[in-house]
Image (tube, rainbow, N blue to C red):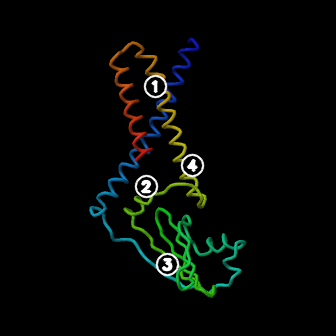
Amino acid sequence: MSTTTKFYQVLKKIHLYAGLSTAALLIMYVATSYMMIHHDSFPSEGGTQSTENIKITAADISEDNWVDFIRVHDIKGRLNNERINASGEKIMQFNSAATNTTLKINATGDEVEITRNEKNLAHSIIGVHRLSGYDGPLKYNLYALFLDAVGISLILFTITGVIMWLRLLKNNKWAWGIFIAGAIYYGIVMVLLYIG
């Protein structure tokens, strides 16, 4: 087997596996998008809300002890919002696919109110669709890493597809016309997104 044939076989395998991982992500996004658009069609019961008030000291929520405080009180997700309201309470909102947790630390800093909203299955699946970026706990960062890996797969899928296409359809005018039309369409969309 020649070097060119081996290279082409490897290229085909890369294209196949990159396409499969991209298809898996696409199926997940199509399913969760459908659930977001037609959320009334899915059961809304099953989610729970609970509130607890805990006496604390400044040391409990200090930077050194914050990770332990989060672990002990089972606060899941990434910190999405942090603010101080008009009465001086510090409000922190943590979100994950399955839960939303709000911490409200009173103005004197000696009590925290923890409100947990556990989502039902349908809303948890929608929550997976909305997860993005890093800057969260380990599971959150792993999910973001897998999304980035799929993004790389999509890039590899495109590059290997174009290389294979160029090899197979060197003199096919229809194929070149479709390729050029696609490139022009992509360029127009990028320009419109940039200026619009």
Q: Nearer the viewer, residue 61 or 181?
A: 181
Vertical arrangement, residue 148 with respect to residue 53, above or below:
above
Which residue position is annotated with label 3? 115
User: From the viewer's perspective, is 150 left or right of 172?
Assistant: right
Mark 4: amino acid: Leu
Mark 3: amino acid: Thr
Residue pictured at 46% horizontal, 25% vertical:
162
Residue pictured at 56% horizontal, 19% vertical:
7
Circles 4 and 2, Cβ within 8 Å, touching? The answer is no
The mark that comes first in sequence, 2 or 3, is 3
The mark that comes first in sequence, 4 or 3, is 3
The mark that comes first in sequence, 4 or 1, is 4
In the orientation shown, which residue stands out farthest toward the front? Answer: 195
Which residue position is annotated with label 2? 129
In what element is the residue under mark 3?
strand
Which residue position is annotated with label 4? 145
Circles 2 and 3, Cβ within 8 Å, touching? The answer is no
Q: Position of residue 21 (x, y in %)?
A: 47, 40
Mark 2: amino acid: His
Bin the neighbour count of mark 1 within 10 Å (Cα to Cα): few under 14, some 14-19, many 20 and up.
Answer: few
Vertical arrangement, residue 154 with respect to residue 74, above or below:
above
Q: Position of residue 71 (x, y in %)?
A: 62, 71
In what element is the residue under mark 4?
helix
If the image is split into quadrants, where does the N terminus sit?
Answer: top right
Q: Which mark is residue 162?
A: 1
CA–CA distance between discs 4 and 2? 15 Å
Residue pictured at 52% horizontal, 71% vertical:
93
Q: Position of residue 13 (x, y in %)?
A: 50, 27
Label 4 vs label 1, nearer the camera: 1
CA–CA distance between discs 3 and 1? 52 Å
